[in-house]
Amino acid sequence: MAKNYEELITELREIVRALEDGETSLDENIRLYERGSLIVKECERLLEEAELKITEMCRE
């Protein structure tokens, strides 16, 4: 099941914490960074969808 915006932001915050704590390996940092990049793209897509819906509602 796809995560909603709030769940994605929570996961992204956890990734940022893990990257900042300095206790993960280089390989893990790379994996976390890649996952974070995907989350950011998905959040942007969700925000664009929401903006379109709001724009459509305002036209009605």
Image (cartoon, helix red, strand yellow):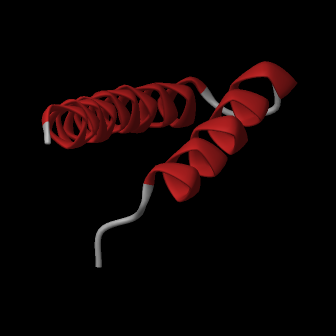
Give above or below for 19 relative to 12: above
> What is the x, y in percent for residue 29?
56, 27
Corner quadrant of residue 30: top left
Residue at 22 percent of width and 43 percent of height: 57
Q: Is residue 32 left or right of residue 44?
A: right
Corner quadrant of residue 15: top right
Q: Residue furthest bottom?
A: 1
Q: Nearer the viewer, residue 6 or 31?
A: 6
Q: Nearer the viewer, residue 2 or 27?
A: 2
> What is the x, y in percent for residue 5?
46, 50
> What is the x, y in percent for residue 43?
37, 36
Residue at 39 percent of width and 28 percent of height: 40
Residue at 50 percent of width and 35 percent of height: 32
Q: Nearer the viewer, residue 26 or 59?
A: 59
Q: Nearer the viewer, residue 55 or 49?
A: 55
> What is the x, y in percent for residue 2?
30, 68
Residue at 36 percent of width and 26 percent of height: 37
